[in-house]
Image (spheres, rainbow, N blue to C red):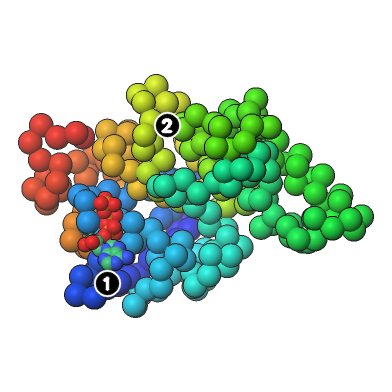
Amino acid sequence: MSLLEVSHLQKRFGGVVAVNDVCLTINQGEIYGLIGPNGAGKTTCFNLITGLYRADSGRFALNGAAYSPHKIEKVAEAGIARTFQNLRLFSEMSVLENVMTGRHVRTRNGLWAALSRHRRARAEEAETERLAWHWLEYTGIAQFAHYRACDLAYGHQRRLEIARALATEPQLLALDEPAAGMNAAEKVALGALLRRIRDDGTTLLIIEHDVRLIMALCDRLSVLDFGRVIAEGTPQAVRRHPDVIRAWLGGENHA
Ligand SMILES: Nc1ncnc2c1ncn2[C@@H]1O[C@H](COP(=O)(O)OP(=O)(O)OP(=O)(O)O)[C@@H](O)[C@H]1O
């Protein structure tokens, strides 16, 4: 069953058509990849889906209903959470507090009420903290809960971004280059975490330059080139697609 359908998405920057008539369907419970050479339109596509940019044209449907990703908060409320290629943590806040900020999307009173002394807000805040601990355990960084985010090792900061995104209880978790800057062992561990997230019921959308990792991880993927989808399907099918070989993977390639 489809979770997110993107139809005829278009985005220009001046004379550049960054995303050109892109259609894709992400099914519930799968890991879906977006790959392509530099400048292919992956980030733009991702930013359109997650509300950072506004499309010139095109439509989105989430669980079969129209979805308009105009505002970041609306995107989170709709059940889509994302991480950023360049980490966007609250670097002076603790690891635990960072995850709690993710959870505030789902609480009734929100961050400001939580700062007040209202009894209901206090109870909600205790629940927020309990859930934040859960996500820290889940992502394997609970032992760093009281560190400042900026004092974590890079690989752990990436996990923290994932923990914070999971705290919003997303239906779709969108990850922008989650393996960037990681060593081989960290990538293997990341792959295991992402599979676990999928197996526990969250759908994933991933942009990643490490083709070997994404081919091993994704259930299906789309390949973009010059803003267009040139191939879509399982890693096995995509890897053999002549346009993909020509446009990008080529030669001894990384696949
Ligand atoms: N904010 C912007 N202003 C102007 N042009 C942009 C902007 N963002 C992207 N572009 C252009 O749109 C095209 C697609 O860029 P995009 O960043 O989406 O590609 P990408 O596949 O994510 O590339 P990379 O792998 O290098 O991150 C490129 O030609 C890029 O120069």
- Asked if the residue at label 1 sits under 8 Å from ligand 1, the reply is yes
Q: Label 2 sits on what residue type?
A: Gly
* SS at circle 2: helix
Q: Quadrant of residue 43?
A: bottom left
Q: Earlier in the sequence, mark 2 or mark 1?
A: 1
Q: What is the total number of numbered labels drawn onto the structure image?
A: 2
For label 1, the residue is 13
Q: Residue at x 32, y 38 (%)?
A: 214
Q: Residue at x 30, y 71 (%)?
A: 11
Question: Is 205 left, or right, of 145 in this rendering?
Answer: left
Q: Label 1 sits on what residue type?
A: Phe
Which residue extends farthest right?
119
Q: Quadrant of the C terminus?
A: top left
Q: CA gap, disc 2 to disc 1?
A: 34 Å
Q: Quadrant of residue 212?
A: top left
For label 2, the residue is 191
Looking at the picture, how far across and down is residue 234, in whole percent?
A: 29, 44
